[in-house]
Amino acid sequence: LVHQSWGCGRCAICLRGEEQLCPDVAEAGFERPGGYAEKVLVPSRKYLIPLDGLSPERAAPLTDAGSTAYRAVRRAMAFLPSGGRVVLIGVGALGQFGVQFLRLLTAAEVIAVDVCDAKLARAAELGAHRAVRAEQLTGPVDVVLDFVCEADTLALAARLTQPGGLIMRIGSGEGWLRFGRGVVPPEVTFTSARGGS
């Protein structure tokens, strides 16, 4: 299996193990060819991950969807007190991993939000405490993980997050949120997550 991101390997960001944040990052399928290739040329053996008996079909989603969702959940944990509430907006591949990691790593109430009934049912199967449409939500919540990142989902996140909470944009959507007084509750942290290391 090939690791998703290749940094320069020399800068401070790479040396702390977060090559996906390197200014010179290259990702197979984005900056470099090979996202769906049968064979990929990698710059070093360190980017190869042994499967140890795991089938390639089961392992492939872990290098992108799995590692990205894991990184987001790990970073969000600092904002999740015991008994906290977290909303995941969008329960496609990344959001489904997010549900599982939240259930494994936290004691938070996990609320999955989507527009697709099949995805909501899958989120419930994976352990979400509630799987609902946006209009069924009430706040406040401690954390919103937005895997969609369109204007309407970011606005929903701003309405739901309590003062001092966290809004994290994880998806590739191009929505934006005006971030100012009266738009977002006081001292809300707004951040993003990119890939995993």
Image: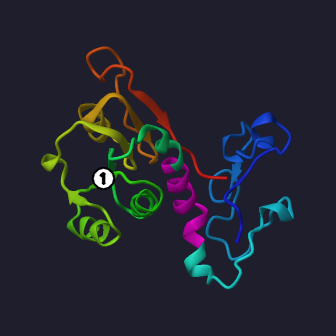
Above or below, 133 against 123 in this view is above
Residue that sits furthest to the front in the current view: 82
- In this rendering, would 191 be left or right of 131? right
- In this rendering, would 61 be left or right of 4? left
The image position of residue 168, as x and y in percent, is 43, 39
The boundaries of the magenta stretch are 60-73
**Which residue does the image show at 43% across and 57% down from the upper left?**
98
**Which residue does the image show at 27% across and 21% down from the upper left?**
183
Q: Quadrant of residue 121?
A: bottom left
- Seen from the viewer's position, the closer of residues 161 and 169 is 161
- Seen from the viewer's position, the closer of residues 116 and 17 is 17
The image position of residue 91, as x and y in percent, is 34, 59
- Seen from the viewer's position, the closer of residues 125 and 175 is 125
Amino acid marked by disc 1: Glu
Classified by dominant secondary structure, the portion drawn in magenta counts as helix
Residue that sits furthest to the left in the current view: 136
| Quadrant occupied by the N terminus | bottom right
**Which residue does the image show at 74% across and 69% down from the upper left?**
49
- In this rendering, would 168 be left or right of 74? left
The image position of residue 64, as x and y in percent, is 57, 60
Q: Which residue is mark 1?
A: 109
